[in-house]
Structure formats: structure tokens, C-alpha cells
Amino acid sequence: MTTLIGGEMLSWSDLDGSHGPAPASGDALRSLLSQPFGRTLVAGPHAPELLDALPPEQLTVLVRGDADVPAVSRPGVTVLCGSLEKLAAAPAYDTVVAFDGLDRLLSAEAQPHSWDETLEMLLAVLEPGGRLLLGMENLFGVHRLVALPPAPADADWVVPDDRDPQRPAGHARLLERLTRRGLSVERDYAAYPSLTSPSVLLSREILADPSVAGALEAAVATAVEARTDTLADPVRLATGALRNGLATELAPAWIVIAGPGDTTIPTPDAVISSREATNLPRGRTLEDHLLAAAQRRDLPRMRTLLTAWQSGPAAGVRAGQIVVSEPAALTAPASAALTDLASAALADPAPAALTALAPPGEPLTALRAFAATVIAGGFAHLWPIPADEAELTAVLAGMTGRELEPAEVPPAGAPVAHAVGDLLADRARLTRELAEAKAKHEWYESMLLRREAELKRVRQMNALLSATIPGKAATTLVGGLRAGKRAVRSVVRRTRDN
């Protein structure tokens, strides 16, 4: 059943992605809808597959574009088309789901409302003691810090105002704003890589556990890997935020589950790629250990870790997707622990010390990826010789006992995206190398000119000396000596023949 409530936008769709961001979607969000919610309102653009996780007979969907009505219509589902302020302000729902946030609930013709006013409209239809599942974009998240200036979309007639004093500025203020309205935050998540399609949801509880930092870092790195050109590498920024306790503050978005506070409905500590994250491997990533060794110029540690990596079944997995278990590998003194790690890797075909979080590929490709990380991150000072990715890969392979020429290293694939900061760093490096090559060329050229001048001077001197009387005498003497030498050779030859 479809009802037009007023403020509907004709010939408009928030679901097809042609007028702005795609709708809220993904299996990570779907996993949060597996519990019974009673009468439920889904407000704003949500992918149709998310609606399939909810009982249709208790589901109401609010969309503002009439073109989206067919996509969300289901047998038994009530569809309301129009603007949020036209919705009857009467408590009618046990649960309100707004994963897409509050920015796309009002039509273009509606009078602009502040964030607080829009939230009040949404809470007005929530039964006392009901639950709110709300998403909110972080306007100072990793995704915005690295993004190039985007082209305005059709839906950008009103842009999120980070100077609006009524919009919660940061994660803590968002929670405080909901608490002030009588809601108790049951669970909140840092969402990566975006509000509309998060694949990693991390709660404050799991982020506070340093023992699983490696697995979380690997998950975040996979989630934020750039697909388009950026100002800087989002992986380095996001994983750096995670290591420094800022994963929540710099997350691209937050997902909050708020209710009356006395519910016993379980919620996962984390969701990674549509699965609840349980029994995560404990430890830091192998890449973290390797870069720490490079930073400290610890060649023995670097060599042992590389050998353990490249001699085991995880050789083809990138170092950032491998967790090194702390208890057996790195809690003992450094030299003994690393020796045990290498021995375990060589003796056991599936060592417990190294846990791969991704399927293996070509070992040299994984090694080259680490070489690229070393160069881009400024850790190549451990190897003082200037080297590109292929040369450094050959050096790293040599540290594991494998003789390799740079020409044998597989070429890097075509980059999917470029980071402007890395391109500027590459330009500075190439400018420096060009200046050094130019200086060397100028030195060689000056040396060649100087030697040519000296050779010309010697020839002129020889010509001058040859024109003098002593010079002519010397020339005659040399000629006579040569003629005598030829005569002696002729006599010797005839004597031998006889």
C-alpha cells in the first residue's frame, strides 16, 4: 500500500545514485537488522535488500521521491511518499531505522530545518521505550580529509553545515544529544569506509582492546583502500588514527543504536564484511612490526621477520593482512623471540605465529607491495642506496636468502587511484634525482672539455717542437732508427729462410 503524505518529489530518486550518494546499503548494516523490532519505520533512502531483513507486515517505509516507490514496495509493506515534516506526529513505531542519517528526509520544497528539529520530527513517531537506529556522517572524517573537491550533486541544494551549532560536532556530542532526549545508547559504532555503504563497524568496546589492534587495522585498511584519486593515502591515515586511539573520532560515519536502556537484545562488538567479529587473532600486523624494525634500523629483526613471512604459507599475503601473534612471538626478549618465530615458520607449514587474513597470491607481488609501502612511508632510510620498488624488492628478497635481480620482480599493476600527496613526493624525489643527474652530467662535461683542451695543447706543442732544428733532427733520427730496424728484420728473415 502506498500513501502520498505531501512534499513528495516528482520524478526524483534517491535510490538510483544519479542525484547524489547511493542509499544506505551493505551486509554490515543488514546484520544489525536481524533482531525483532516490532512495528518499524525505515526513514530515508535504504537499499531494497535491507528491507528484506524486516517482517513486511510490520514495516513502513518513508521515501521522498515518487520514483523510488516501486523499488521499496513489497507485499504487506506500507510505503509513505513525501517529506518527513508531513508525517503524522503520533507515536506509532516501536523502532525507527535511519541508517542514511537525517539529511535526506526532507524534500527540496520544505523549509530548511536544523539537525535538532529534524531529529525531533523523527523521535515524535517513536513509541516511548522504542529503539532508534541512526546513522550520521562525520564531517571531519578520514574520507573528507583525503577527498579531492567533489562536483556538486543534484541533491546538494542544502549541504551539511559543520558550523551549525545544533548539529552534533563529533561523536561524543552525538551521544550526548541522544541521551539528553531520553534515549540510552545501547551500542555505537565507528563505520568505515562511508555512511551509505559501511563494511566495517567497530564499537568503542572493541576499539579499547589493544590485543586485537592488528586484525582491526587490517580490516580498516581493506575498507578504506582508495578507488579514486585522493589527496593522501587513506589507508595510512585511517590505520594511523586507529593506532593513535582516534578511530572513532576520525571515522567517516557513526551508527548508533539507542533505546530505553533496559533491553536485552544482543548487538555485536564489531561487524567486518557482513560477519560478526568474534575470536579475532590477537597481535599487531606483520607490516607494523616490519616498519617498526625499519624505523629503528634493526636489520636482524627485519631479516628474521621477512624470512618467517616468505618461508611460510602466508608468503603471498600482503604484510598488512597478516597478524603476528603476540604471546609466542614477541613477548620474549627480542632476539630470542624472533629466532623462535623464524624457527616456527620454517618447521611448521602452518605456523600459529602468523595468521593470514586474506587469501595468498604471488609472494613477490606481496613483497613488492611492502617495498612500495616502505618507500611511500619514508622508511627506506634503512637501505641507504637509492632504490625504486623493484630494486628494493630484490634487496628484501636477498635478506631472506633469495637471490633476485630487479628485472625478475613482477611489474606493479596499473594503480587504481593516485594520492596527490604521494605524487607530490614522487615529483620532489624525481626533481632531486634529476638535479643530481644534471650536476653529474655537467661535471662529466667539464672534465671532458678540460681533457680535450689539454690534448689539443699537447698536439700543438708537438707540432711546434717538430718544426724546430732539434725537433727535425730528432725526427730524422727516429726515422733512421725505424729504417735500420726494418733492415735488421729483413736480414734475420732471409737468414732463417736459408
Image (cartoon, grey):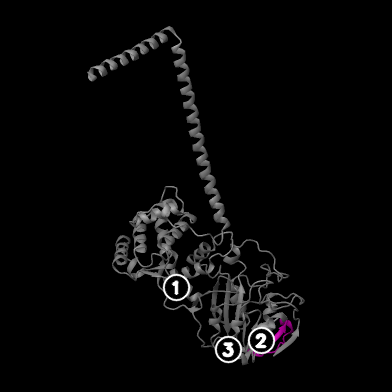
- Which residue is farthest front? 498
Earlier in the chain: of badge 1 and badge 2, it is 2
User: Going 73% across and 88% down the picture, which residue do you hit?
Assistant: 3
Image check: 447 left or right of 478?
right
- Counting from the top left corner in percent of width and height, residue 240 is at 50, 63
Query: Which residue ends up furthest to the top in the rendered image?
Result: 469
Pointer 3: what residue? 37
Q: Which residue is mark 1?
A: 209
Q: Is residue 362 visible?
A: yes
Q: Is residue 348 magenta?
A: no
> From mark 2 to mark 3, how far is it between C-alphas?
20 Å
Looking at marks 2 and 3 on the same chain, the residue that comes earlier in the sequence is marked by 3
Asked where in the image residue 116 lies, by quadrant, the reply is bottom right
Q: Marks 1/3: CA distance? A: 30 Å
- Between circles 1 and 3, the one closer to the viewer is 3
Horizontal and vertical percent position of residue 208: 47, 72
Tell me whether the residue at label 1 lies in contact with that at label 2, contact meaning CB atoms closer than 8 angstroms.
no
Q: Which residue is identified by label 2?
A: 73
Which residue lies at the image location 48% right of the left edge and 58% below the top edge?
412
Amino acid residing under circle 2: Ser
